[in-house]
Amino acid sequence: MSLDLTSLKSSVKSLESSIEISKDWITGKNKNIDEVIRAGVICNFEFTYELAWKFMTRWLSVNYSPSVSGIARKELFRIALEYKLIDNFDSWVEYNEARNKTSHTYDTANAEYVFNTAKKFLTDIKKFLKVLEENNK
């Protein structure tokens, strides 16, 4: 069974666009604009991360074991690493932690952390999507 990757592709593209826009618009000159742009990147990160781990679960359920569905995120990432869906376990744990902090983005330090993590995530989510595309049966 092949997975329909359309929603994941779309969310990755949206995350990438929001990060590119942030490079031009976050200048430090207007705090309100900076916060709005940063919030857009964080929102795109949140949505894309959620899709990523759900697609990871679906792929592993089909190609590894149906029992993957109920496991903890860290265990999911370990199995994904074993099956070469991802290449850095620690980074994915960090993305999970950043996702958990998105409900606290009203805190400037948390928002900055999640924003910077989202930029790092873009590289890994693109790799993950490429692996899924190559191994989508």
Image: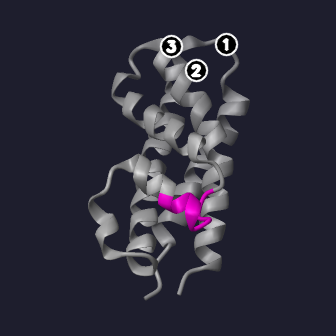
Residue 75 percent across, percent down from the top left: 41, 52
- First in sequence: mark 1 vs mark 2: 1
Residue at the location (39% across, 49% down)?
Answer: 73
70 vs 82, left or right, is left
Residue at the location (53% across, 87% down)?
Answer: 137
Q: Secondary structure at mark 2?
A: helix
Q: Which residue is mark 1?
A: 28
The verdict on residue 84 being magenta is: yes
Residue at the location (40% across, 28% down)?
Answer: 101
- Quadrant the N terminus occupies: bottom left
Q: Secondary structure at mark 1?
A: loop
Residue 43 percent across, percent down from the top left: 44, 39
Viewer-side residue, 30 vs 46: 46
Q: Around disc 1, counting alpha carbons within 10 Å, would you say few (fewer than 14), some (14 to 19), or many (20 or more)?
A: few
Q: State which region is magenta.
A: 79-86
Q: Which residue is mark 2?
A: 34
In which quadrant of the rendered view does residue 102 lie? top left
The disc label shown at residue 109, or none: 3
The verdict on residue 68 being magenta is: no
Viewer-side residue, 119 vs 95: 95
Three-letter code, disc 2 = Asp
Viewer-side residue, 64 vs 30: 64
For the residues labelled 3 and 1, the Cα–Cα distance comes to 15 Å
For the residues labelled 1 and 2, the Cα–Cα distance comes to 7 Å
Tags 3 and 1 touching, CB below 8 Å: no
Viewer-side residue, 3 vs 83: 83
Tags 1 and 2 touching, CB below 8 Å: yes
